[in-house]
Amino acid sequence: MTLDPAYFDYPRRRPGMDHDLYPWSNLFERPPLAWPGGARMAVAILVSLEWFPIVPGEAPFRAPGHMQTAYPDYRHYTAREYGTRVGFYRLLDAFAAAGVRVTVAVNSAIAERYPSIIADIVASGHEIVAHATDMDATIDSSVPEASERAMIVRARDTLAAATGAAPKGWLSIARSQGWNTPRLLVEEGFGYCLDWVNDDLPYRQGTDAGPIVNVGYNHELSDRQIIVVQQNSADSYVEQMKDAFAWLAGEGAPRMLPLHVTPYVMGLPFRIGAFEGLLRWLRGQSDTRFLTAGDLAAGLPAETPAA
Amino acid sequence: MREGERDPGLYDFRPWRDRPAIDWPGGKRVAVWVSPNLEYYELDPPANPHRKSWTRAHPDVVGYSHRDYGNRVGHWRMAEAMTRHGFPGSVSLSVALCQHLPEVVADAAARGWEFFSHGIYNTRYSYGMDEAQERAMIEDAIRTVRDATGQTIKGWLAPALTHTPRTLDLIADYGLTYTCDLYHDDRPNPVHVARGRLISMPYSLEVNDHYGFFVYNMSPREYADTLIRQYDRLADEGGTVMCIPLHAYLIGQPHRIGPFEEVLRHIAADGRAWITRSGDIADHFLTSGAYAAAEADAAAYRPEAAR
């Protein structure tokens, strides 16, 4: 056996990253950020609000959480809808009880199908970021640029019509991008993106159309990762979030604790109580504010070099 | 190894009972080494015909950025905790990190850590290499680490655990003394190679943080408890080696580093551990008579001797 000699070419073996999307940067050597409102700890809650067609799209890949059985997959279609009808309202009530603002990443199909939900989100003062059109609208580099742009524009315009303002933030399904995605987001008016999970703080990425801020909601701390993938309990999830908060707060400089939750996971009757308890605990921590993705992106000063 | 045969002939059988004693320095019961994998994964690596790198089309944003977290954030947290409790690292190094992020390599070197090779990138696999190609990779690794740190590597952990039938012979031929790729024992053991002397250094997949979190789906506290049980048992038995294999992008997460620090505190306070580096364990094993004793012990169990 032998490998193609090209396998031993390393054209990007050089100082810095092996790509031009962003420069490397050590979290602990950056000037500290200043969160809006001045608190040291930010709690950043992100809720994914999704619509899964019962006939799942396969291109370019099937989204996590999508249909799994042979057609018709009543169990997953309805269990996801449970999250939207019931679980999401439990979460909204929990946020209201704790008096906190959150970010909701919304498939634009939700605005078309259930406009009252959008009205309820807006009335509560929460932030909406665009989260593709529906759970078939996955992105990777096999998607033609024109199709990807059309999907981004449709998601943006549908949400703009429903809320009165175009969303400035974007979350890709499964955080999956193609090579063009950051540039297309900038060209279509987005200022920040929630896809990259390589940092505990917002940082700036570069595109040929200008910079975009990445506000990473660490997927390792999400309910999907901890409860669905790793199958830990809601109580364990809460303990892990408290441990994470304590560690981050102990680092001294301003930090954020990202809580990415899913209505069909955290909104279930046997889990929501644990989550409500976590919100109360976080509410009681000193020098702590609940901030949206837009607040966090604004915490990155304009004069910060792309880092 | 004996290529193509049912028994690869890697080493001799030795039952766990009635082993000759191993005297670790200072009368310690268990040699403990911590092995941070300092890795670099490429965003757009060439394809190896025998193994796929990323699960998604490039760019695999979550896969890549999760690993990148280790170099931006996780390493610094993990390294500080280790230094605080007196644990040096024995680094399983993607040697291209020396070119990409010399800051990380210099930090590890300044802490007195040892480097051994984990290949060029964790996205370039040994599968399919001919002998000249594999020699070129090994020579690249030796040269790169020497140029960056002044250290001459003594050990090898195959890139992404990809081997060829000749890997062990080749690393011994280049004067390396230990392999971390064999998991048959809680002590070092002689390995059969064509020329030179090679020992197996107990590494671990079972208590590797990757297995803990993504194979066994442990919570951070469960993983910490697992490490403490592993340590307590190996210290009770004596003459043993315990490796704690880590990945900065996993253990350096904010919900995991706190529970992990408790493990370091426990081992450091116990007093029975020789807290050291893999190369120091190998040197001691090879020069203290333990290697010869292991050979003699093994000879007693060879089928021809039993007859």
Image (cartoon, rainbow, N blue to C red):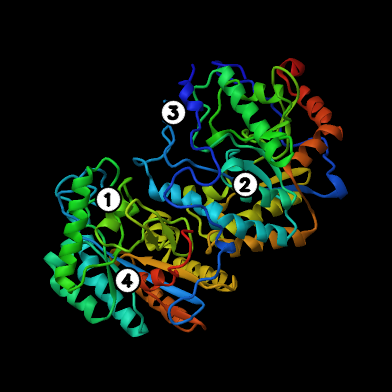
Chain holding disc 2 = B
Chain holding disc 4 = A
Q: Within 10 Å of the Cα at label 1, are there few (<14), some (14-19), or many (20+) other Cα atoms?
A: many
Which label was assigned to residue B48? 3
Describe the element under mark 2 as helix, strand or loop.
Answer: helix
Label 2 – label 4 distance at C-alpha: 37 Å
| Residue A183 vs residue A74, the one in the foreground | A183
Label 1 – label 4 distance at C-alpha: 21 Å
Residue B136 on image: x %, y %: 60, 23
- Earlier-in-chain disc, 2 versus 3: 3
Which label was assigned to residue B102? 2
Whether pointer 2 and pointer 4 mark residues with C-beta atoms closer than 8 Å, the reply is no
Chain holding disc 1 = A
B284 lies above or below B303: below
Q: Nearer the viewer, mark 2 or mark 3?
A: 2
Q: Amino acid at mark 1?
A: Ala
Q: Nearer the viewer, mark 1 or mark 4?
A: 4
Residue A196 on image: x %, y %: 40, 55
Q: Nearer the viewer, mark 2 or mark 4?
A: 2
Chain holding disc 3 = B
Query: Label 4: which residue?
Result: A103
| Residue B232 vs residue A112, the one in the foreground | A112
Q: Amino acid at mark 3?
A: Asn
Which label was assigned to residue A278? none
Q: Nearer the viewer, mark 2 or mark 1?
A: 2
Whether pointer 3 and pointer 1 mark residues with C-beta atoms closer than 8 Å, the reply is no
Which label was assigned to residue A63? 1
B7 lies above or below A209: above
Label 2 – label 1 distance at C-alpha: 37 Å
Choose top left, top right, bottom left or bottom right for residue B117.
top right
Describe the element under mark 4 as helix, strand or loop.
Answer: strand
